[in-house]
Amino acid sequence: MKVSSIPASSWQLLSTTALLISLSIFAISCGPGDDKLPVLGQKELVTRTVDGKTVTDSVAHQIPDFAFVDQYGDTVTAKTVAGKIYVADFFFTSCPTICPKMKVQLKRVFEKYKGNSDVLLLSHSIDPKHDSVAVLKKFADNLGIAGKQWLFLTGDRDKIYDIGQNSYMVTAQEDSSVPGGVVHSGAFILVDKDRHIRGIYDGTTEAGVDKLMKDMDRLLAENKA
């Protein structure tokens, strides 16, 4: 079936469902009775030399270093999120379909954790050609967002698409047959202080975001344990 034959809302739901199913295959179990959230993503093999011997270890999937620009014109890197948990999503300001729902729901997260120095929100634009620093600043202002806790990011298009697909494991695809011209996932991705993905949620629904916030509380408690 071609993408163009599926309504944008249905494609988003299918993409999110398929993503959650596939990620469950790669979840790292925490053991019976352990209340910690699983670490999602396929383990990677790393070869190193120890005492003259070659050793191969498996390490958890991790969001790599990155550099994008926020709505204030400041560069945001992995150092910005160091020691914090954060929620990442992918959107564009002119999106007429799922993005408005996503931003309503993500604002709920912002309001709950507003002022918590251990929590950040990173919204990546998948239309950086249009979504300049000025456009993102106006978008944030219209949402009533100020300060540096919820950052709207722009930058090189290929790098944004690459980190979305290969690191955060979400989809985005240009499609002129759908409103806005882009089909993309409505997922919110929960990332821990070590840049490991700990959960992926439907960011278009209240129930999905309720689950996200419960898991954020669990992750914050885990960090203090």
Image: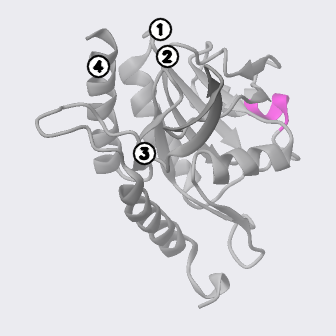
- Specify which label sits upstream in the sequence, 1 or 3: 3
User: Mark 2 and mark 1 in contact (Cβ < 8 Å)?
Assistant: yes
Q: Which residue is tagged 4?
A: 222
Can residue 163 be seen at all in this image of the molecule?
Answer: yes
The quarter of the picture where the C terminus appears is: top left
Membership of 144 in magenta stretch: no
Q: Is residue 216 above or below residue 91?
A: above
Type of the residue with mark 3: Leu
Residues under numbered marks 2 and 4 in contact, where contact means CB atoms less than 8 Å apart:
no
Q: Amino acid at mark 4?
A: Glu
Q: Which residue is mark 3?
A: 40
Q: Which mark sits nearer the N-terminus, 2 or 4? A: 2
Q: Secondary structure at mark 1?
A: loop
Q: Nearer the viewer, mark 1 or mark 3?
A: 3
Q: To which residue does mark 1 refer? A: 117
Q: Position of residue 157 (x, y in %)?
A: 84, 47
Left or right, 9 with reference to 68? left
Does 156 sit above or below residue 15?
above
- Of badges 3 and 2, nearer the viewer stands 3
Query: Local crowd at mark 1 within 10 Å, few (<14), some, or many (≥20)?
Result: few
- The percent coordinates of residue 202 (x first, y second) are 41, 53
Residue behind mark 2: 84
Q: Residue at x 78, y 27 (%)?
A: 67
